[in-house]
Image (cartoon, rainbow, N blue to C red):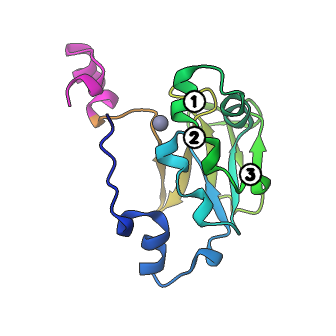
Amino acid sequence: MLSPDFREEMTALRQVERLGFSAADVRHIVLTHLDFDHAGGLDDFPHARVHMLQQERDYALQQKTWLDRQRFRPRQWSTRGNWIVYPSRVGEPRFGFDAVRQLQGLPPEILFVPLPGHTHGHAGVAIQHGGGWLLQAGDAYFWHEEMDWRIRAARPACACTRR
Ligand SMILES: [Zn+2]
């Protein structure tokens, strides 16, 4: 359904290596959520601390439904001992969001922004860059037109139905 690209050179590890670094150089991973297509490469970075919202970890670990067991795959989580979790509702109001927070061991230019919905503990990552802020929104939305209120008002539909 998602048509993932299975070429090894597309893995995060190979892309990091192409930049001249090794897996051991990766010390922090800020994870938006634990869907298999986002968490599948965690085991390639055994020395990294993995930051995520507590609600994401707790819900994924429950493996409640058939769908949960398809999307959250514990066999991808051998680095679980390196996970650092944060309460979802603790943080400061910022950028119009309720609970934006800093992450342990990371500079204040990298912030966690809870964006629940796609998963229970889904989060975005705000990164200060070039005098402004970028938001890595994970799977909070799938198509840029979803963020344009004029288009959304005219054609309210999930982007996944237009693919
Ligand atoms: Zn997802």
Give percent across and percent down for residue 69: 57, 30
Q: Is residue 48 above or below residue 17?
A: above
Left of 159 or right of it: where is 84?
right
Residue 115 in which image quadrant: top right
- Is 10 drawn above or below residue 50 in the view shown? below
Tell me the tag on residue 8. none
For marks 1 and 3, give the one nearer the viewer: 1
Residue to which mark 1 is pinned? 69
For disc 3, the marked residue is: 80
Magenta stretch containing residue 148, yes or no?
A: yes
Does the Cβ of the disc 2 residue fall within 8 Å of ligand 1? yes
Camera-near label (1 vs 2) is: 1
**Over which residues does the magenta segment extend?**
145-163
| Rendered position, 122 above or below 161 | below
- The residue identified by callout 2 is 33
Please tell me whether residue 93 is drawn above or below residue 135 in the rendered image.
above
Measured as percent of width and height from the top left, residue 132 is found at 47, 55
Amino acid type, callout 3: Arg
Which three-letter amino acid code belongs to the residue tagged 2? His
